[in-house]
Image (spheres, rainbow, N blue to C red):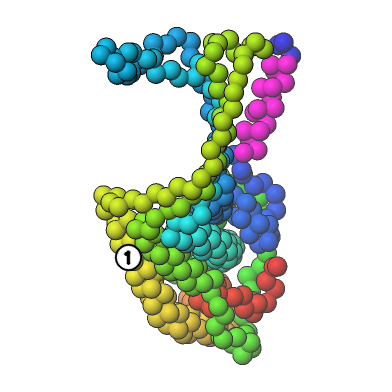
Amino acid sequence: MNTKATLMHIFSTITLLGSSASWAQELTLSDAQKMARENNPSIRQMNSEVEISRAKVTKALAPQLPQVNATARHLLDQKFQVMEVSLGPTPIEFPVRQPLSQVTLGASLLVFDGFGTWNNYRSAKYERSAKELELERAEFELNQRVRDQYFKALGSQALVEVAKQSVSMLEAHLDDVKNMIKGGVATKLDLLKVEVQLEDAKTDLLAAEDNAVLSVAQLARVLGVNSITGPLHGKLPVLESEMLKKLDLTKAERVDRRALLNKEESAIAKSSASLSAWSPKIYLFGQQEWYNFESSDIGGNSRFKDAYTVGVMLNWNLFDGGASTAERTIALEEIKKTREGLRALDQSIPVDIDFWKRKLTHGIAVYQSGLSGIKKSEETIRLAKSAVRAGTRTNTEVLDAEHDLNVAKAKVVHAQIDAVESVSNLELALGKSLDILPGKEK
């Protein structure tokens, strides 16, 4: 027993560790998007909402299907009611007997209810379709969020490398200036300037490292896991002017817009269903009974008789306390709500498309400018170092050129991150993938 308990404890521990959902392997963008779909709490909640909406369809149709029920009753003790019957001068009392044992099997079928069940069924089907479309949209949005955060994490790591290079360059400069002071070429002022820039670079490095850690933590949050300890495998996209020519800005039919349309149809059907409360309901019914008046024994000696009834029943609720009126008011307000949502969405789509297209255009221009700045800064550094060796320039020109180089590198990384965000938001506004990011992982 102890061995079995130990094995069960080990198994439960392994299961618990697995359910903690941390990621220690190399993580690609496609891995991240797949993991998010499986672990993101919002997606899991929406999956449950879809299943609930599907069950509501079955529930809404149920009243239109045959209803079958069975009851059984056996009296353990009894004192029957007494009814007086006047057959002469003195009334005679007769006991009003009931079956000592009774089994009843009944069935009913709703023939007409003012189309209330049918409209409720239609409403549930539209609601189910809306939930399925909302789930599809949520998964699409999640893919964009994962891609944005994934490239932000990659970019933050690239910025750490830029900050490290800046610190390394300044530390090398500090050593050079100290040697130059010994040779009488540099002054204390040059040393102080490098030391100040080095301190600033070290604080910038700390900030970049903190941002990198936070970016990975934010990525883990989007994925729905506790942590990501493995490296990210990927590169920031190369941005080209040709990307703008490949943009297909023809609007696709957004699934969230279709979801709103289905919600509107669901509310319209629900409003129609509320009117059925004023309509009579007609049922066909049948009932078969087996009963025993003679003996309370329910064994083999019991003598049961049988009876049956078949007929039509009408039920007309003339007043329901205002429940149907309230349901209709709710449905009409839901119609207004969804129509306003559609109007707001239609107004926002062209504005979002234009805004993010401009942002993408600006991001590509900044990227190209940054690349040009890197080349020019590298050439400036080479020339400044040659001039310093020739004695025609000071170390300050080299420091300024290297600072410009690091600024240009950071500029390129930020432009790449912004471009990914712009493309993702363009895709969200259009409701479709653009496939214009070079090297984008499928």
Q: Residue at x 68, y 64 (%)?
A: 234
* Place of residue 276 in the rendered image (x, y in percent of width and height, measured from the top left): 39, 59
**Observer-nearest of 171 and 226:** 226
- In the picture, measured across the screen, residue 11 lies left or right of residue 413, that is right
Quadrant housing the N terminus: top right
Segment tinted magenta in the rendering = 4-19
Q: Is 283 part of what is drawn in magenta?
A: no
Q: Position of residue 303 (x, y in %)?
A: 62, 16
Coordinates of residue 154 in the picture (x, y in percent): 59, 63
Tell me where residue 121 appears, x and y as whole percent. Answer: 51, 58
Write the residue at 38% across / 64% down: 271
Going 70% across and 53% down the picture, which residue do you hit? Answer: 26
Residue at horizontal 63 percent and vertical 35 percent from the top: 17
Tell me: residue 42, above or below residue 424.
above
Residue type marked 1: Glu
| Location of mark 1 (residue) | 333
User: Can the viewer see residue 128 in this picture?
Assistant: yes
Name the element at disc 1: helix
Q: Quadrant of residue 440?
A: bottom right
Which of these two is toward me, 273 or 423?
273
Residue 16 shown in magenta: yes
Q: Nearer the viewer, residue 58 or 292?
A: 292
